[in-house]
Image: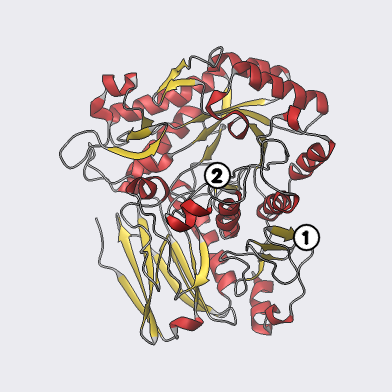
Amino acid sequence: MTHTPLHWTIPASPDTVRVLINGYQSWSEAELRPLTDTPPRAHFQWMIDQGQDPAFPPSGEAGVWRSHTLIALLRPDGSGWVGCLLDATRTFAHWEARADGAAVTVTCTLEGPDAPVAFEETEDVQVTLERLSAHLGEAMHARTPAPLRVWCSWYSYYRDITLQAMMDNAQRAYDLGLPFDVFQLDDGFQADLGDWFEPSAWFGGHAKDLPAQLHALGYRAGLWLAPFLVGPHSKLRAAHPEWLLQDEQGEPLLLGDNWGGPYHALDTTHPEALAWLRQLAATFRGYGYDYLKVDFLYAASHPGRRHDPTVSRAEAYRMGLQALRDGLGDDGFLLGCGAPLASSIGLVDAMRTGPDVTPFWDDEARRVLLGDGAVPSARSALHTALTRWYQHTWYQPDPDVMIARRERSLLNDQERGALEGLLDVIGGLRASSDPIELLDASGLDLLRRSLTLSTPDRPRSLTHSHGGAVTHFTRGTFNLLSYAADGLAPHSYNAAPVQDEAIQLAPAARDLRASL
């Protein structure tokens, strides 16, 4: 069900207003931009399928900004307006801010059952945004357990991971006394998407062989799954085509482009598919994995024909995620990724809050020329995760891994320092994916620093930015630009706040923040 849009007219000149948006899922960009700018829109449908909400993608139109769950509009003094959905259990909220002559119009359209929405004018946008987002987390019974320190195989080995490589890295970490809590096996151990219990030809064993060996070294065993995806050539696809999300012609729908082509989505309103998901998580828990990273979760809420047509997309997603939680158990650790963010609150323990980090700074051709703001890169991860600083009240944030190595990496010292700053400012999970044998003394030192847990920081300004994101924090300042700004080198982080009298808080704003 889609409701009649809620509508507000703001008496502010569009060229004086900044807009803060939140993308649909983990990888969808979060931005802090002048309202009159043009939001990027990906040129290819598979990019929208995989990085945005196909039902409410970016407009690609100057002065028209779309946001999911919440939105904020700022005057130059930090005052402005904040809108926020207050219960995302069964409902998506589609916000749009539009430059409309000498004013700004804001609409909020609910997709799903009716749900409470707040829209407030405020003297301090940051305080109000933090308060309303915290209210959402509390209303949905957010899980925020102690953060963990994780080694992940993906950015070392990608799909070429082997059982021996996992244990080689675990043993080296143990010998060096590196403070990891979890060793997580990523994509590559399985024969196909959906055929999770059949090993790949190269893995050199079975996923069930790993946990006992990790436990012997004192590590928890973690595992990556893409539980809502089904490979077009998988045995699961052949056995149960009725479990798949369908297109308008009633055929199994194909979406995205990864693993060499498109893939299917599981229909999480089908009772048998839900039972299979519960058993999937329960079986791996039985093998000894009490930490699951569940990825590409947006597939469960992709538009399509479902077994139960009365269920909203948000409900369908939540049903699939609940099945995984039930199978894993309440005491298991569930990390979401590629997931509709707010609709995951209360079921996941942690959530990826930006695109994948890469061992290079930017994929400018894909980001700029093809309009894909969700493209994996170090820059993209910083840009989006920093602009979601407030989401630590929804789950433990996962800003992705520190890349400390110099070999097999194009990142320079300043860019590695920016990643280290990201982890410190956002708090939450700490993760590494470097082949430990490639780390020299300085790399090991950087890795150890990046594994030091921290509390989440807060911005000291939303009215100043070095790069279209939230960059000015109380602990330091980021420069995401390709040129120097305020004495900061390009692609860098300065752990001492830049002194700038222009961003000192007004007395009223200081009073509001002191009362938070």
Q: Nearer the viewer, residue 488 or 339?
A: 488
Q: Amino acid at mark 2?
A: Asp
Residue that mark 2 sits on: 356
| Mark 1 crowdedness (10 Å alpha carbons): few <14, some 14-19, many ≥20 | some
Q: How many marks?
A: 2
Q: CA distance from mark 1 to mark 2?
A: 23 Å
SS at badge 2: loop
Give me the residue at 54% from left, 52% from top. 394
For residue 411, side relative to residue 226 (left or right)? right
Q: Describe residue 43's horizontal placement relative to residue 213 as left or right.
A: left
**Residue 235: image location, x then y, percent:** 33, 18
Residue 37 rendering spot, x and y as whole percentages: 46, 72
Q: Which residue is depicted at the point 53% across and 46% down?
A: 376
Q: Which part of the image, by quadrant, shows the N terminus?
A: bottom left
Viewer-proximal residue, 440 or 109? 440
Q: 224 or 160: which is nearer to us?
A: 160
Toward the left, the furthest residue is 249
Pick whichever of labels 1 and 2 is earlier in the sequence. 2
Assess disc 2: are there few (<14), some (14-19) or many (≥20) residues with their C-alpha within 10 Å of its C-alpha.
many
Colour scheme of this structure image?
secondary structure
Q: Which mark is residue 495?
A: 1
- Res 106 → quadrant: bottom left
Cβ–Cβ under 8 Å for marks 1 and 2: no
Q: Amino acid at mark 1?
A: Ala
Residue at the image position 56 percent from the left and 66 percent from the top: 468
Task: Tell me if I can see residue 494 in this picture.
Answer: yes
Residue 413 horizontal side relative to residue 36, left or right:
right
Q: Is residue 182 above or below residue 29?
A: above
